[in-house]
Image (tube, rainbow, N blue to C red):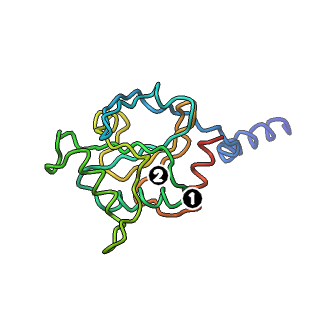
Amino acid sequence: MRLQILVITTLLLLPSLSGCVEEAAEEQEFPQFSAVADDYLTYNNSIMAGAPYIVMFSAEWCNSPCYSTLHAIWDAQAELPVLVMSTDPAKRAGGVTLQQWHESANAHDDEENDTGVELSTYAFMKGDDTALEMDITTPGTTFFINSAGIITDRHEGLLDDQELISSYWETASQ
């Protein structure tokens, strides 16, 4: 009888214990991509392999939170490798070329005679196919990817917390 009570009690408690054991997060590889950027270079997984990098899904017409996030990443640590991929499938979304889009992002922090920061290590390119594959429907989503091509962090919306950016980058760099 005691054995039956013990078994029944154990069975009743098991559902409440589920979730007590933390499962390791499943690693997600950044999908295959290849795109020509505003600097006329082709970027793809092979070229980016071996070093961490950041991908921000944006659009030629996305000023906020996109430009603010791009400059916050630069302010957290200048000259990180950042691929800025447009979610807009139009060849010249808003009538803007990739080069004009990059110049517009550079000018985001300009004030009168101060030209501000030039996002010189950022490459602007189309990425609508990659965005669709990753189910990105709106701009403003940022991924930190390690040297093996594994996504280490994903952030949606404005990312302007310097400590959080540094933490994401540190994780991707391990």
Which is more toward the observer, 128 or 123?
123
Residue found at x 33% / y 44%: 124
Question: What kind of residue is marked 2?
Answer: His
* Residue located beneath label 2 in the image: 155
Label 1 element class: helix
**Quarter containing the C terminus:** top right
Residue found at x 31% / y 33%: 36
Q: Residue furthest bottom?
A: 112
Location of residue 110 by image quarter: bottom left
Question: What kind of residue is marked 1?
Answer: Leu
Q: Residue furthest right?
A: 2
Residue 110 as seen in the image, left or right of residue 23 = left
157 versus 5 height, above or below: below
Mark pair 1, 2: CA separation: 10 Å
Location of residue 104 by image quarter: bottom left
Which is more toward the observer, 6 or 127?
127
Count of numbered labels shown in the rendering:
2
Q: Which mark is residue 94?
A: none
Which is more toward the observer, 34 or 15?
34
Which is more toward the observer, 165 or 35?
35
Which badge, 1 or 2, comes first in the chain's sequence? 2
71 versus 138 height, above or below: below
Q: Which mark is residue 164?
A: 1
Q: Position of residue 19 (x, y in %)?
A: 65, 44
Q: How many residues crowd mark 2 within 10 Å: few (<14), some (14–19), many (20+)? A: some
Residue 55 as seen in the image, left or right of residue 1 = left
Q: Position of residue 43 (x, y in %)?
A: 39, 31
